[in-house]
Amino acid sequence: MDALIAEFPRFLAGFVGTLRICLFAAIGALVIGTVLAAFRVSPVPPLRWVGTAWVTVFRNSPLVVVLFLFAFALPEVGIDFPLFENNAFFWPGVTGLAFYTAAFVCEAVRSGINSVPPGQAEAARAVGLTFTQTLNAVVLPQALRTVVPPLGSVIIAMIKNSAIVGAVGVTGELFSVDASLTAIGYSATSSLTGVAIAYLVITIPAGILLGVIERKIEVKR
Amino acid sequence: MTSVLFDAPGPRARRNTLIGTLIAAVLILGVVALALLQLSGSGQLDGAKWGPLFNPANPYFVAVWSALGVGLGLTLTAAALTLVFSLLIGTLLVVTRLSTTRVFRWLVVGFIELLRGLPVVITIFIAARVLPEIGIALPPLWYLVVGLTAYNCVIIAEILRSGVAAIPRGQTEAAYAVGLSKLQTLRIILLPQAFRIMLPALISQLVVIVKDTSLGFVIFNFSEFVRTARIVIQFFAGSEGVNLTLQMFVAVAIVFILINFGLGKLAEYVQRRSGRARKTAAAPILKVGAGVGEGGTGGL
């Protein structure tokens, strides 16, 4: 507790840092995941294969391994990410987290597409809409409503996973606050209590908010 | 496949699909070619780099994989122990939540919400660093098991609770009618069915546990799979002067993907089989199962 009060600015900075990582990663994951979901239901086989391969690879490998590949192996290959506030791991970490989460976003969106009654798409087809029009004007707007609750869980899980980004070397987020506090002599118990509380401050309200949204937008059929 | 999104293709649609397929194939091949070019340009395709991991004739092959095998053994042991303890504690939690007085119920709900909100890497780190500080020194493997169990037992409690909720009310009513107590009803009637309904979701959670054991690398001085991989990388960088980072983590990823892909297929098989076995009541049960497997907080 002593650390939490005396070093409050550090925790606050880490808190903001975590939120910033999550914001970038969430945008990336939502965009890539939605595109992948469109790939997975597309009539063009190679696009379907790309979607399936992406989901299979990223859903079955641990995030740590993905992050190690992005942070340590890509520079070896000659792919260098730009520095972010002097930290070389920030963009590899954010990209890895976004790519990994995109697989789960894709599955959530796809099951949302599948949850739209076939009659809707059939009716759209019957009035002569094309595949793209059917998807954009009829199926996706309905699917996105069904998809919000699972998507919310995916994003909350992503916020928790951002701690792993800190564990592989991104500084300036909550997990790295512990290392800096330990370095100046605080006990692990006091610094980790603070870190744990800071995560709960994000995840518990997010969960409650998600529950409220879930009840509000519930599709009644 | 949602084939309802498009008509059974006629000649023109087939031509368009073909053109799309060609364009997509060319683009994908282009990306693959670019990646290979980048890899060979930076010397990542050398036999010396892949040999120790993928060529059985390589002098290092046996040594590298036996070291990795020891690490993988520790990782899988941790996953198995975590599953056993999480099932035991999770069952205990759900029984407490469903059968006792309000005070205990609130305590359990608070406990669940608290642990569910923490990143699992944090619970592992807390186990590894706080337990020794308060005088509980364990072998490193057990810190991983404690940290993973703390998180997964509440997820399994939630899975089981939604399993119990999916059982028709008539079961409980019938049990009360023949004079069973609340606890007996849970133990004899509800939990066995909940386990069966939720078996696919429980197997999916096992995939999450196996993936999360890789977080054991944050524990100091514990050579599980991922840390062993990093030690091997350091060894080759030091004594041979080759950097195996890419190759090693590709190998690690392949091992995890094979294990988890297998478990995922097992979950699908169990789901299909249980769906067939109870055709009459399958619809609501499957819906709950799918919801937990995909949208549950433990899903990543």
Image (cartoon, coloured by chain):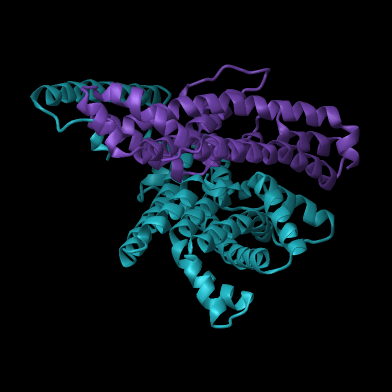
Chain colours: A purple, B cyan
Residue drawn at the location 16% of the way across and 25% of the way down: B18
Front-most of residues B163 and B260: B163
Q: In which quarter of the image is residue B33?
A: top left
x and y, in percent, of residue B252 in the image = 47, 45
Q: Is residue B194 above or below residue A3?
A: below
x and y, in percent, of residue A118 in the image = 28, 38
x and y, in percent, of residue B76 in the image = 52, 59
x and y, in percent, of residue A12 in the image = 79, 28
Q: In this view, does B64 lie above or below A38?
A: below
Q: Quadrant of residue A85?
A: top right
Residue drawn at the location 67% of the way across and 45% of the way down: B117
Q: Quadrant of residue B12?
A: top left
Residue drawn at the location 25% of the way across and 23% of the way down: B24
Judge from the rendering whether residue A40 lies leftward or rightward of residue B220; answer left or right: left
Judge from the rendering whether residue A23 lies leftward or rightward of residue A176; answer left or right: left
Viewer can see residue B50: no
Viewer can see residue B1: yes
